[in-house]
Image (cartoon, rainbow, N blue to C red):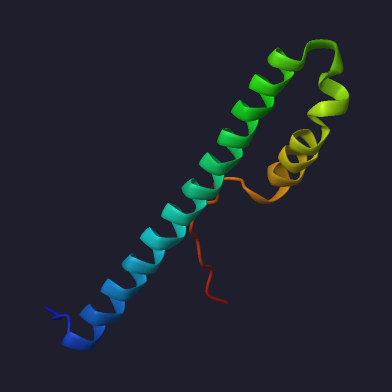
Amino acid sequence: MSRITDEQRAMLKAKLEAQDHHIRESWVRAMEARLVRDELEKCQKSEGVNSYENCRWLAEKYAAMLKTHKVQGYKIIDV
């Protein structure tokens, strides 16, 4: 029967904390994108016909965020 040493336990704990941190940050970025989307919808509703011109900066910001602010899992493949 093998026992886990203190060093292995510390490494495992650090790895789990890193995973939690990565996933938490990923969700924060996704929620930021959702907030921008909600603001864009409000802007489009309030501006009406002029929304293409007046809300353009929000649309561009949201489009850029869609590329980088996705929820990403945490998977490390050791090669």
| Horizontal side, residue 12 vs residue 78: left or right | left
Residue at left 62%, top 48%? 69
Q: Is residue 19 left or right of residue 72?
A: left
Quadrant assignment for the C terminus: bottom right
Q: Nearer the viewer, residue 56 or 19?
A: 56
Residue 77 position, x and y percent, is 53, 68
**Among the 4 quarters of the image, the one containing residue 38:** top right
The count of marks equals 0
Q: Residue at left 30%, top 80%?
A: 11
Q: Residue at x 51, y 52 (%)?
A: 26
Q: Classify the position of the N terminus by image quarter.
A: bottom left
Residue at image point 36% right, 59% down: 20
Query: Quick check: 22 left or right of 29?
Result: left
Q: Is residue 13 left or right of residue 69?
A: left
Residue 64 x %, y %:
76, 46
Question: On the image, which quarter does residue 47 sit in?
Answer: top right
Q: Nearer the viewer, residue 78 or 66?
A: 66
Give 63 or 11, whichever is nearer the viewer: 63
Q: Quadrant of residue 43?
A: top right
Tell which of 51 and 33 is nearer to you.
Answer: 51
